[in-house]
Amino acid sequence: MGRAGGDRLTLWDSAFGIESMSDAFDPDVGDQFAERLLLLDDSLACVATIHLCVEYWINRLICEQAPMAADLLGRPELRGMNAKLAIVCNMSILPAGLCRNVQKLNELKARCAQRLDVDFTQMDLAYDDPEGNVNLEQFRDRLISGEEDTAKAVLRWVGLFTFGWLSRHCVEELGMEPQEP
């Protein structure tokens, strides 16, 4: 699903509204992730997709960076994302802001699992931006007013601040091979 350079910029621009997103991921992995989000009209589906893609990297981190911990994942009580996050975040291989972001995403997914008509106007927008350029709180008024597609735009940023940051960190900082999510 990889795209030529010009198409990639168009894809990122339509997914996130700014050009710099194309640098956030391995290009092919990033394109696949953005394409998946662009296909979704439902905010709940966006949360589930982002969460599954993040969990992909979390599972790989545990298996590749902590093989002894990977053996523990066979135990039913350690299969959940909370247990996996506790393992990965306590390994000190991820920046603290990234751990916070993934924990926030996991909490959002849990809220969606408890209530399918979750009120996205009440979601926690205090995500850490690895570049320090975007504060999601700027979208609060647009979320509350019900402006069309605002929740999906915010969730795309959440995807960038979780999956994007995690993917880039795993590849660039930890030397892991990118694979399609």
Image (cartoon, helix red, strand yellow):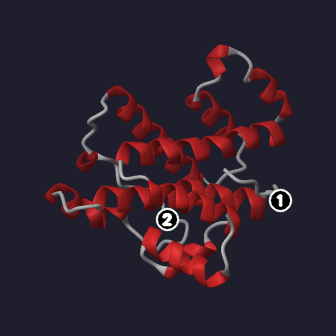
The residue carrying mark 2 is: 129
Return the disc, 2 or 1, that comes first in the chain's sequence.
Answer: 2
- Residue with the mark numbered 1: 175
Q: Amino acid at mark 2?
A: Asp
Residue 42: percent from left, percent from top: 35, 48
Q: Residue at x 61, y 28 (%)?
A: 83
- Which quadrant of the figure contains the N terminus? bottom right
Residue 65 in sight in this render:
yes
Q: Are marks 2 and 1 in contact (CB under 8 Å)?
A: no
- Quadrant of residue 156 in the image? bottom left
Left or right: where 174 falls relative to 85: right
Residue at 21% x, 63% y: name it: 142
Name the mark nearer the viewer: 2 or 1.
1
Crowding at mark 1 (Cα within 10 Å: few <14, some 14-19, many 20+):
few
* Label placed on residue 77: none
Image position of 13 (left or right of 23) = left
